[in-house]
């Protein structure tokens, strides 16, 4: 291609000289020499200007060394017809290292350093739009790729708000600031895949994180008003100042304009809508406004929708506003008799996809129970915004595994009751529920005889496991035991007799507060009762009393267990009393200021202490009154520095002397019991009562 240009240049030269108009041998010779000389130097690294006068050739231009100039002159001298060669050379400086520095700031773009030639100088000036630079054409460029690499870095500099480019030989450092991450990514892509041998250090920061505009504001009765977001530059919604109440939040402003002109008017309209929202959330994103909340009057919903009509064109407006409830709790009841599935209840307006006659078909198709079904639903005015019915649909397949059953769903969750043909069917129903429901399904029968254990503990209440005889259930057992809740889901046998079990439970009912625990084990042949006495209780006396109370054929075991650790705590489910274990006894856990007035008041809450009739020994059932008395005395004497005067008043005998004797002995019995329970003997005195003021009783006064 360049040879073609040389030929064309020769022709144009000849024409310019008028060779074809007036033959002139000298002009034709000069033209031929110039064409040959141009062809000899056109591939030089730096442009060479050739002029010919007669047979003398003048070469003018830049060279990197004197040797390069001499080589060009020798080449020209060797051309046919050339008699003399005149060199007019500028020997370029040799730059080492070969470097260039580009900079962009508010003051403009500057360029300093070296370039390998005029072509590179012109290209950089055009890219950077520079009329004048401090760039110097010099020798020493590292390789032929250097100029193109520098031009790529100049293009990268143009994309920056401010920055610098430093190229030293093949080491390149580019740093600066761009508006958005996408600009930084573009620069990184532009400077990827540099020629081999080049090292790039890139440090480009962004003015903005590039995330889109957003605004979020919510209000609820507990948290108040909260808001957050990212707003356009120089925009602060005036509505923020009128939110009112407890307000928590902050917004940040974008560093650059992200080019969403609709965001500001949409946010202003959103804040107007928020004035009507007592409980809910508004979210604004580019060209989308979403509002949800309620319950609210229908009139308020219409006002919000009217404001939505003022939104700019192209903005998507999404609402999920709940009308005020009709006051009827949402609930569902599914009943399955093995043939027909019936559903009733009060449901959200969006329950199922159809109402009326079509709803039954939709329900049966979704339930998957066949074609026999009944539907009796009433609808609330509000839709289901949060998947209220999801637990119901998840639990409904459990009914299909049963012979018959009921599934109830409401504020208290899911409950399933019914009967299963065998343990496998019951297990299949339980697997569907996955412990997410109250499950009370009985087996028709598993073929095993009825055997069960009913256990009661004063700290954990009652539980039953096993298979009950016919006529019994956890509810029946609970009633016999005094109404205590009984945990467990026992099977019920079609055989067996439960009347004797109920007689035993009725006999035990009055003893629940006097022992630690009771277990009743039932087989067809035997009812066994195992009792653990309270710490410090007389096990033999307890057993003797229980033998008298229980039906004759009951097998009774009374055995003490190791006491709990000192300081252990519990809630006594029978006495409904928090307790602490101290000095080998359970005592009420009390808290009051230990002064005379409060101590007297606490004494009024201590139950009467029973004594053996006509004797000084403590009677059966004295454990809890003594424990309560000890708890009061321990606080009042230990922390109130009071001294307790104990007196047992007696009026059971008509002989005053005997009453005084009983008073002295009973007072001593109580005092010793208090010492056993951790009351300091130094903080107690005894007084023998001359006569009773209000029947047999223990009186405590304070000093």
Image (cartoon, helix red, strand yellow):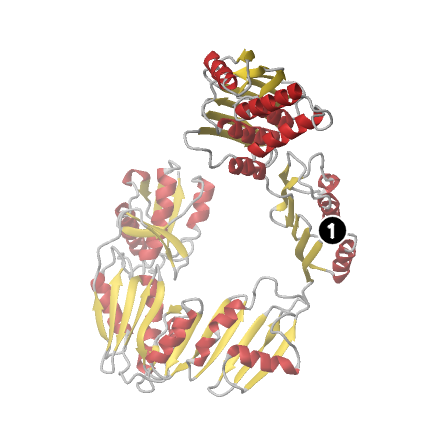
State which quadrant residue 361 falls in.
bottom right
Residue for point 47% across, 34% down: 194
**Image location (x, y in percent) of residue 175:** 53, 27
In the rendered view of the protein, which quadrant contains the C terminus? top left
From this view, report whether residue 281 is shown above or below residue 508: above
The reply to whether residue 470 is visible in this rendering is yes
434 relative to 195, above or below: below
Estimate the x, y position of residue 45 in percent, counting from the top left: 52, 23
- Give the answer, above or below, for where 538 lies relative to 485: above
Q: Is residue 476 visible?
A: no
Q: Residue 496: which quarter of the image?
A: bottom left
532 lies above or below 27: below
> Residue 463 at what x, y percent from top left?
34, 68
Q: SS of the residue at dot 1? A: helix
Residue at 53% across, 67% down: 390
Q: On the rendered structure, is 689 left or right of 24?
A: left
Question: Which residue carries the number 1 mark?
Answer: 273
Quadrant of the image containing the N terminus: top right
Q: Nearer the viewer, residue 549 or 80?
A: 80
Residue 267 shown left or right of residue 61 in the figure:
right
Residue at left offset 32%, top offset 41%: 684
């Amino acid at each position: 291609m360049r040879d073609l240009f040389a030929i064309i240049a020769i022709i144009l030269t000849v024409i310019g000289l008028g060779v074809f108009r007036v033959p002139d041998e000298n002009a034709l010779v000069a033209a031929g020499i110039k064409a040959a000389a141009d062809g000899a130097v056109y591939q030089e690294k730096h442009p060479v200007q050739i002029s010919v006068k007669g047979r003398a050739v003048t070469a003018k231009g830049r060279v990197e060394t004197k040797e390069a100039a001499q080589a060009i002159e020798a080449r020209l001298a060797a051309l046919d017809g050339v008699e003399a060669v005149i060199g007019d050379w500028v020997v370029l400086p040799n730059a080492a290292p070969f470097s260039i520095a580009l900079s962009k700031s508010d003051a403009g773009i500057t360029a300093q350093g070296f370039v390998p030639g005029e072509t590179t100088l012109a290209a950089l000036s055009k890219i950077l739009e520079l009329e004048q630079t401090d760039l110097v054409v010099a020798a020493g460029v590292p390789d032929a790729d250097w100029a193109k690499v520098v031009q790529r870095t100049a293009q990268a500099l143009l994309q920056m708000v401010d920055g610098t480019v430093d190229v030293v030989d093949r080491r390149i450092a580019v740093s600066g600031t761009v508006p958005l991450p996408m600009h930084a990514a573009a620069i990184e892509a532009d400077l990827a895949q540099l020629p081999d041998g080049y090292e790039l250090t890139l440090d480009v920061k962004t003015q903005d994180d590039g995330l889109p505009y957003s605004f979020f504001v919510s209000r609820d009765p507990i948290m108040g008003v909260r808001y957050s977001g990212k707003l356009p530059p120089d925009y602060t919604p005036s509505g923020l100042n009128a939110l009112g109440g407890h307000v928590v939040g902050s917004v940040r402003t974008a560093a650059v304009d992200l080019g969403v002109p609709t965001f500001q008017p949409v946010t202003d309209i959103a804040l107007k809508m928020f004035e009507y929202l007592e409980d809910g959330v508004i979210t604004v994103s580019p060209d989308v406004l979403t509002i949800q909340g309620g319950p609210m009057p229908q009139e308020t919903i219409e006002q919000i929708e009217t404001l939505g009509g003022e939104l700019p064109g192209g903005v998507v407006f999404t609402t999920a506003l709940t009308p005020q409830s009709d006051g009827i709790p949402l609930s569902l009841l599914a009943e399955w008799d093995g043939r027909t599935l019936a559903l009733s209840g009060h449901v959200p307006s969006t329950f199922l996809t159809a109402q009326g006659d079509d709803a039954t078909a939709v329900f049966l198709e979704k339930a998957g129970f066949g074609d026999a079904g009944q539907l009796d639903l009433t609808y609330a005015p509000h839709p289901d915004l949060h998947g209220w019915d999801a637990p119901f649909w998840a639990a409904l397949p459990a009914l299909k595994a049963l012979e018959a059953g009921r599934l109830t769903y409401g504020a208290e969750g899911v409950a399933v009751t019914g009967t299963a043909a065998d343990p496998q069917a019951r297990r299949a129903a339980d697997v569907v529920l996955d412990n997410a429901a109250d499950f009370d399904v009985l087996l028709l029968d598993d073929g095993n005889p009825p055997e069960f254990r009913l256990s009661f503990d004063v700290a954990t209440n009652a539980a039953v496991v096993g298979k009950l005889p016919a006529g019994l259930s956890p509810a029946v057992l609970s009633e016999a035991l005094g109404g205590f809740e009984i945990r467990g889901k026992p099977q019920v046998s079609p055989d067996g007799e439960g009347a004797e079990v109920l007689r035993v439970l009725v006999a035990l009912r009055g003893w629940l507060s006097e022992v630690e625990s009771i277990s009743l084990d039932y087989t067809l042949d035997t009812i066994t009762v195992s009792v653990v006495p309270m710490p410090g209780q007389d096990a033999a006396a307890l057993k003797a009393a229980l033998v008298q109370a229980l039906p004759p054929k009951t097998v009774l075991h009374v055995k003490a267990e190791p006491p709990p650790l000192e300081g252990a705590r519990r809630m006594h489910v029978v006495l409904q009393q928090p307790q602490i274990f101290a000095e080998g006894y359970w005592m009420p856990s009390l808290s009051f200021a230990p002064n005379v007035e409060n101590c007297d008041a606490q004494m009024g809450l201590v139950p009467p202490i029973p004594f053996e009739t006509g004797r000084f020994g403590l009677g059966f059932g004295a454990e809890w009154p003594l424990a309560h008395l000890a708890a009061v005395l321990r606080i009042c004497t230990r922390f109130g520095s009071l001294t307790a005067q104990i007196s047992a008043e007696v009026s059971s005998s008509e002989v005053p002397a005997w009453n005084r004797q009983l008073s002295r002995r009973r007072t001593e019995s109580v005092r010793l019991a208090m010492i056993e329970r951790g009351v300091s003997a130094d903080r107690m005195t005894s007084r023998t009562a001359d006569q009773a003021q209000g029947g047999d009783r223990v009186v405590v006064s304070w000093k």
